Image (spheres, rainbow, N blue to C red):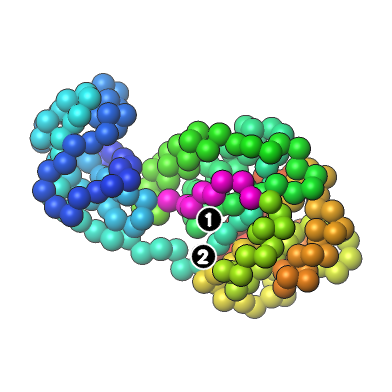
Amino acid sequence: MELPFFFEENLPVEGNFILKEETSKHIVQVLRMHENENLLITNGKGQLLTATVINANKKNAEVQIINKADRPKHSARVSIGISLIKNTNRFEWFLEKATEIGVSEIIPLICERTEKQHLRYDRMKNIIVSAMLQSQQAWLPVLHEPVKFNTIINDTRHQNKFIAHCVDDGKQRFSDRVVSKEDQLILIGPEGDFTADEISNAIQNNYIPVSLGETRLRTETAGIVAAVLLLNR
């Protein structure tokens, strides 16, 4: 039987420690765990602890570390810059699935045709934490606050940069590109696609225009397709 899996942002090196109230309540009231039962805890940065409950208090449960392990990162580092969309539920679906797949970084974008300008960051963070735990991972994607399109295209951190758009001309298929898997960023536009100026500016900043297939995809679907293609190159 798999051990219950929890997230604690700050983990000690050794010994005993108190879990946050939300986790404590889930352990004691929902899972009905008792003293001497084991669980897994990650900090979302690769560290994975096996611990034993030594005080099953619903507000401040205490556990004792019995084993530590470090899980390596995915060999492919994939960052997705994706426009915010009107339908919050669809964007949340993207966050959940991108996390389960193993995306390293998610950058919500505000483009010229982006209609929604804000997101509830705390809620979105909780969604990716839940998806990380559900998929039994120890690395939490970095979730950024929304950034403007012109800000991201001037970012020089990424070696391999792509922009997926719906214009027919001048695009390449992913299969035609041989690049390093270590650092990849792809931009996904809003419901109305990127503007011609945005596409041109991205290309001038060394973004490669690419095709995600033969059909026109919703923003959130395009983000997932891009993630799968990049992670499995």
Report the amino acid beneath label 2. Answer: Arg
Rendered position, 61 above or below 169: above
On the image, the x and y values in percent for residue 60 come to 20, 29
* Residue 205: quadrant of the picture: bottom right
Instruction: Check residue 82 for magenta coloring.
Output: no
On the image, the x and y values in percent for residue 115 come to 76, 37
Where disc 2 sits, the SS reads loop
- Residue at 64 percent of width and 33 percent of height: 88
On the image, the x and y values in percent for residue 135 come to 42, 46
On the image, the x and y values in percent for residue 159 come to 60, 73
Report the amino acid beneath label 1. Answer: Glu
Residue indicated by mark 2: 77
Report the mark closest to the observer, 2 or 1: 1
Q: Is residue 127 visible?
A: no
Q: Residues within 10 Å of mark 2 (few under 14, many from 20)?
A: some
Magenta part, dominant SS: loop
- Residue at 26 percent of width and 21 percent of height: 29
Where disc 1 sits, the SS reads strand
Residue indicated by mark 1: 105
Marks 2 and 1 sit apart, C-alpha to C-alpha, by 8 Å
Residues at marks 2 and 1 touching, judged by CB atoms closer than 8 Å: yes
What span is colored magenta in the figure? Answer: 140-147
